[in-house]
Image (cartoon, grey):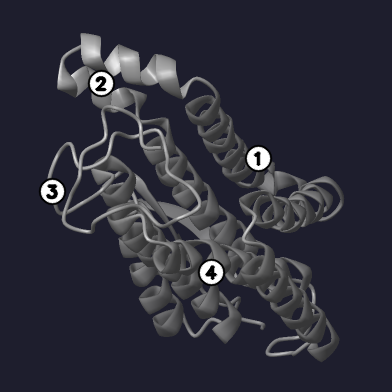
Amino acid sequence: MAPALDREGYWGSTTSTLDWCEENYVVTPYIAEFWNTVSNLIMIVPPIFGAIQSVRDGLEKRYIAAYLALTVVGLGSWCFHMTLKYEMQLLDELPMIYSCCIFVYCTFECFKVKNSVNYHLIFILILFSLIVTTVYLKVKEPIFHQVMYGVLVFTLIVRSIYIVTWVYPWLRGLGYTSLGIFLLGFVLWNVDNIICDSLRNFRKKVPPVIGITSQFHAWWHILTGLGSYLHILFSIYTRTLYLRYRPKVKFLFGIWPVILFEPLRNH
């Protein structure tokens, strides 16, 4: 049963197996969860520019795929939170698994010759994705999806810690920043779930501009979108160091990080 504050909107009744803490159709009748929807822009726009820059820099296709996969997750999440339909929920959740598999591949293939392809790892990741997809479509249990996604994220964390501990310690700042931002988003995601009633009551008592700050699921999108983007940069930075390039993190407009690099003359 929908909470009392929720309203009916353009997309009709909710069919998704999840309905988040943001009140439905409050801002506009055309978007079920407005802030949870628009917060996905951070996962849609910057990775597109990252993919374009990767093409210009001649990076391996895996990194272009990583950027575009993050954009697909953002688009799927946009559709899910806009409609709260089960089909759109799948468009959000399943690409989370697929994109994370691409991240795993990139991180584990940092120390190989240029343009190498690890067919065994590709097979394992594709098989994992197919198994998760098949089981999830059958059981429709969000906890199963969350656990499988957690397995992939844990794998990335372990691999990243290995890189900054034993291979390139000077990348700790970028690696741990990516991890810390992502984990902060995870904490806010849990807070949003656990104290939802309190958050809704808080929003009724304060001006809307203050209530917006308590949309913690939207913050989850913002923080995990930034954390994932930084992880791609971390993976690219590691790769270009191994290939004997000169990578540098720059900030566009003083705020948004990108990587610029050039090959060493003797490479």
Residue 29, horizontal then vertical, whole percent: 13, 48
Crowd class of label 3 (few under 14; some 14 to 19; many from 20; radius 10 Å): some
Q: Which image quadrant: the N terminus? A: top left
Marks 4 and 3, the one that precedes in the sequence: 3
The residues bearing labels 4 and 3 have C-alpha atoms spaced at a distance of 27 Å
Looking at the image, is mark 3 or mark 1 nearer the viewer? 3
Amino acid type, callout 2: Gly
The residues bearing labels 1 and 2 have C-alpha atoms spaced at a distance of 30 Å
Q: Residue at x 27, y 18 (%)?
A: 203
Q: Which image quadrant: the C terminus? A: bottom right
Amino acid type, callout 4: Pro
Residue 138, horizontal then vertical, whole percent: 67, 70
Residue annotated with mark 4: 95
Numbered tag placed on residue 176 in the rendering: 1
Looking at the image, is mark 2 or mark 3 nearer the viewer? 3
Amino acid type, callout 1: Tyr
Residue annotated with mark 3: 29
Q: 184 and 170: which one is in front?
A: 184
Residue annotated with mark 2: 211
Q: 176 and 157: which one is in front?
A: 157
Looking at the image, is mark 1 or mark 4 nearer the viewer? 4
User: Are circles 1 and 4 on residues that touch, CB within 8 Å?
Assistant: no
Marks 1 and 4, the one that precedes in the sequence: 4
User: Are circles 4 and 2 on residues that touch, CB within 8 Å?
Assistant: no
Determine if residue 241 is in view.
no
Marks 4 and 2, the one that precedes in the sequence: 4
Q: 34 and 181: which one is in front?
A: 34
The residues bearing labels 3 and 1 have C-alpha atoms spaced at a distance of 40 Å
Looking at the image, is mark 1 or mark 2 nearer the viewer? 2
Compared across the picture, whether 192 is left or right of 74 comes to right
